Image (cartoon, rainbow, N blue to C red):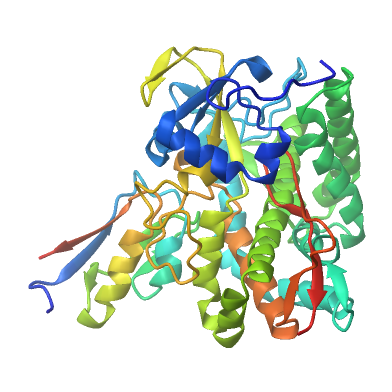
Amino acid sequence: MREKGTLRLSIDSARCQGHNRCCALAPELFDADELGFAHVKGSGLVPAALEEKALLATRNCPEYAVRAKRE
Amino acid sequence: MAQRPPVSDWSTDFDHTDRRWIENPFVIWDDLRQHCPVAQTERFGGVYLPTRYSDVRAIAYDTNNFSSRRPVIRENPPTVGLPSPPITSDPPHHKPARMLLLPAFTPQAIARLVPRTQRICNELIDAIVGAPTCDAATAYTQHIPVRVIAYMLGIPEEEGDRFRRWIHVFLEDTIVDDDNTAADRLLATAAEMDDFFRPYAQARRADPGDDLISFLVQARHEGQPLTERHLFGALRLILIAGIDTTWSAIGASLWHLANTPADRARLVADPGLIPTAVEEFLRAYAPVTMARQVVNDIEVGGCPMKAGRLVLLPFPAANRDPAVFRDADKVLIDRQDNRHAAFGLGIHRCIGSNLARLEITVALEEWLKRIPEFRLDEKRAVSWSRGPVRGPRSLPFVLGA
């Protein structure tokens, strides 16, 4: 059963070291800047169809920099 | 110190150049993690060895108490330093040295190398396919990163043998010192590398191209062009850190597939799974163990550490910690949650990680397409490298069904 609320992604830029796991796993949701550090695309709100990918990205960040919160 | 005595106790007298560690460090680390999670030794001037993910991570993050000035542990290090910024740099010098290299290694910059890497792999496979046996380490895996790096630097790919010789001196030969020549040989090799790069640097200053040497001679560090010492240090880093590491990761992945027919068949049938499998091979067979030097007396994982002593940071041991990874000792090529630390953690994250991932993925894709059937040749031995980078240096395969 789907949980209530929309998932919002954020990246703790103090933690991100540019491993780029999030960009590789969910290119629809993340992008890398000109130095290779990641940021979320747009508002960070995750369409329902991409929730699984968003959570996969959070669970593969070696620096625990990708956060997902329900709003 | 001609002879190193055999290890009496891995928790108090470990030796990372011991034959047993080279053959299979995992059983040593697993045992220590359960009974003595931070081991130590008086060898190599005094070294600590954390084996839990949490301790490895804490040390990697604590750049105030742990310096990167000696990232490779040597029995007799030279008295003059060989800085290779940013890997040998600490804050505050680390960040500007790293920032200037980062643009050359972003996912976008590295993605442009896919066609060239595919071509390199296929040219190597052309010379292997059809034979009944091969040594995949010397015929395939060792050439891929050398040629890709040479291409990036704008240096003829035929210089690869020279690169491998230098790297062997740096990472394997001179980490122990049986005849008191290691420091001299290391410095002579560094000087040889500088002499090799000097004419390239001069030529690219006069007539820059779109290669990495041109990029570096045009780069600005705190507003100024790089000093020759910084430039050659960075080039030494790119060569040394970018070749044996990826060679080892590709080799260990092929070694696993040669040993595990079910995984091999699954990736042949479903190449879309290769990127996921690559992450698992990186977790399970992470090639790189770096070092730190303790700056201030401190305690980690219940173990007091004295200033001036060294710490081995075995990212491959952290990657096998069952507190963080379910079925940590099993290689599961479809593992979804894989927060592994193969490329390090914190500010020294491997700057070439996007490049390494690309090379490993392409190397496996192209090999499996054209050589789907292979296994270890039981009549010949697999040999593993010694030192901070672990991978197979011979991979005798029987090819075909």
Which residue sits furthest left? A4
Question: From what the image shows, is residue B106 above or below residue B116?
Answer: above
B233 above or below B162?
above
Q: Is residue A45 left or right of residue B11?
A: left
**Residue at the image position 51 percent from the left and 43 percent from the top:** B317
Percent coordinates x, y for residue B213 in the rendering: 76, 50
Residue A41 visible from this viewpoint: no
Taking the image as shown, residue B221 lies to the left or right of residue B231, namely left
Camera-side residue: B288 or B225?
Answer: B288
- Could you tell me which quadrant the N terminus of chain B lies in? top right
Q: Tell which residue pokes out farthest to the bottom in this image.
A: B269
Q: Residue B398: where, in percent of width, then height?
A: 81, 74
Residue B299 occupies quadrant: top left
Relative to B181, residue B257 above or below: below
Number of numbered discs overlaid on the protein picture: 0
Q: Quadrant of the C terminus of chain B?
A: bottom right
Q: Is residue A25 left or right of residue B236?
A: left
Residue at x 66% of width, y 73% of height:
B364
Give percent across and percent down for residue B356. 63, 59
**Image location (x, y in percent) of residue A70:** 13, 65
Q: Residue at x 61, y 47 (%)?
A: B101
Residue lying at 85% horizontally and 18% vertically, measured from the top left: B2
Q: Nearer the viewer, residue B79 or B333?
A: B333
Q: Is residue B242 visible?
A: yes
